[in-house]
Image (cartoon, rainbow, N blue to C red):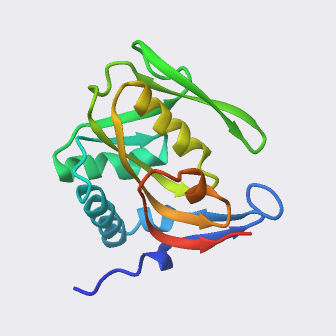
């Protein structure tokens, strides 16, 4: 079977959610079983190369990729959620967004100290959310083995913001 060209399954929506933004819509990829499988396989292979002990997915689209990756690799899946959505004792990190601030939570017992965690999300843009997730992993005493993304929006500084961490992406779009 021919390799799937994943980029053709990403739809670009101009001026969404506001004028001047080119939104990269992953729903066509999710809607095509072969493309979705190929994306999960490639992301899982990148993660496997660093021998993680857990896959950490960032709410919510990181769950779409992280959970099947964890299943394929036989690893636990750890969700990082938006503030207030985890029921047990948790740690919280606040981080800056373009238009304000947000918070992410992780359960205090989600990772054992020393665990190599691989962080997963759909898009790497400015890197703020991924950096907050890395801080949560490290607050638990675990190590960030790397971070994997379906898409990188180059030019928004995400890769630079995650300097010091391994960053894997399947495709890159140039953004100004």
* Residue 174: % across, % down: 64, 74
Q: Give the residue at x 80% y 56%.
A: 18
Location of residue 49 with respect to 97 vertically, above or below: below
Quadrant assignment, res 4: bottom left
Q: Which residue is drawn at the image coordinates 27% and 87% (left, top)?
A: 2
Residue 48 lies in what quarter of the image?
bottom left
Rendered location of residue 88, percent (x, y): 39, 13
| Residue plotted at (49% across, 33% down) | 135
Residue 121: image x %, image y %? Answer: 46, 50
Q: Residue at x 44, y 17 (%)?
A: 90
Give the left or right position of residue 23, taking residue 46 as reference: right
Say above or below: 104 vs 90: below
In depth, the one of 62 and 125 nearer the eye is 125
Q: Residue furthest front?
A: 164
Image coordinates of residue 41 in percent, x first then y, are: 27, 64
In the image, residue 50 sits, relative to residue 84, either above or below, namely below
């Amino acid at each position: 079977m021919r390799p799937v060209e994943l980029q053709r399954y990403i739809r670009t929506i101009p001026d969404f959610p506001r004028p001047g933004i080119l939104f990269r819509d992953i729903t066509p990829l999710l809607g095509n079983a072969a493309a979705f499988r190929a994306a999960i396989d490639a992301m899982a292979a990148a993660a496997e190369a660093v021998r993680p002990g857990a896959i950490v997915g960032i709410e919510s689209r990181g769950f779409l990729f992280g959970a099947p990756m964890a299943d394929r690799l036989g690893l636990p899946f750890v969700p990082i959620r938006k503030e207030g959505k985890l029921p047990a004792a948790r740690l919280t990190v606040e981080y800056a967004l373009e238009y304000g601030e947000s918070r992410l939570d992780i359960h205090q017992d989600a990772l054992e100290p020393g665990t190599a965690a691989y962080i997963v999300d759909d898009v790497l843009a400015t890197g703020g959310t991924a950096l907050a997730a890395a801080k949560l992993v490290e607050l638990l005493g675990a190590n960030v083995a790397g971070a994997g993304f379906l898409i990188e929006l180059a030019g928004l500084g995400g890769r630079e913001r995650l300097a010091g961490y391994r960053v894997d992406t399947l495709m890159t779009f140039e953004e100004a």
